[in-house]
Image (cartoon, helix red, strand yellow):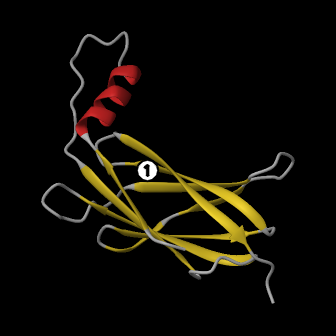
Amino acid sequence: MTPGAWRAGPGAVALLAAGLSSGCTRAAIVPPTVDVTWTISPAAAVVGPATLTVTLRGPAGEAVRTATLHLEGHMSHAGMAPVTGVAQERDPGVYDIPFAFTMAGDWTLIVSVALPGGAQVERRITVTNVRPSG
């Protein structure tokens, strides 16, 4: 599995903030850019336990601490119950989310990040060809 990276820029966060603040009389505050990178362990995804490690960095490269991260994993076909996981901050700005691939096949992992101050970011990770264990 190749690690990935996303950048939640001010435009994306402003759009989210505008949608959440409709009806409010105060102007939305746009947070600075946040870089989001990730890796999955084991790198060759197999049925069984796995860990998604997400790293959050601010615009100057500083660790983004005390964020809340939640994972929801879905198979590419209907009928499977999603798997979920909640992150623990292992190091400043580095979050581990333990979960399990319950079946072989293609998966979509949805990572929801609640940043300090209330802004939110959501990312999708496609994991193809999860193999049977053994």
Residue drawn 18% across the image and 64% down it: 62
Report the number of discs: 1
Label 1: few (<14), some (14–19) or many (≥20) C-alpha neighbours in 10 Å: many
Residue 22 vs 71, above or below: the answer is above
Residue 24 vs 122, above or below: the answer is above
In the visual, does 129 lie left or right of 21? right
Judged from the image, the secondary structure of the residue bearing numbered disc 1 is: strand
Residue that extends furthest to the bottom in the rendered view of this protein: 134
In the visual, does 25 lie left or right of 50? left
* Whole-percent x, y for residue 115 in the image: 34, 48
Closest to the observer, 113 or 110: 110
Residue drawn 31% across the image and 67% down it: 93
Quarter of the image for the C terminus: give it. bottom right
Residue that extends furthest to the right in the rendered view of this protein: 79
* Whole-percent x, y for residue 56 in the image: 32, 61
Residue drawn 83% across the image and 52% down it: 80
What residue is disc 1 on?
113
* Whole-percent x, y for residue 10 in the image: 24, 37
* Whole-percent x, y for residue 25 in the image: 26, 10
Residue that extends furthest to the left in the rendered view of this protein: 60
In the visual, does 100 lie left or right of 25? right
Quarter of the image for the N terminus: give it. bottom right
Closest to the observer, 14 or 64: 14
- What is the three-letter code of the residue carrying label 1? Val
In the visual, does 99 lie left or right of 20? right
State the image quarter where residue 121 is shown: top left
Residue drawn 37% across the image and 14% down it: 22
Closest to the observer, 45 or 100: 45
Closest to the observer, 17 or 128: 128
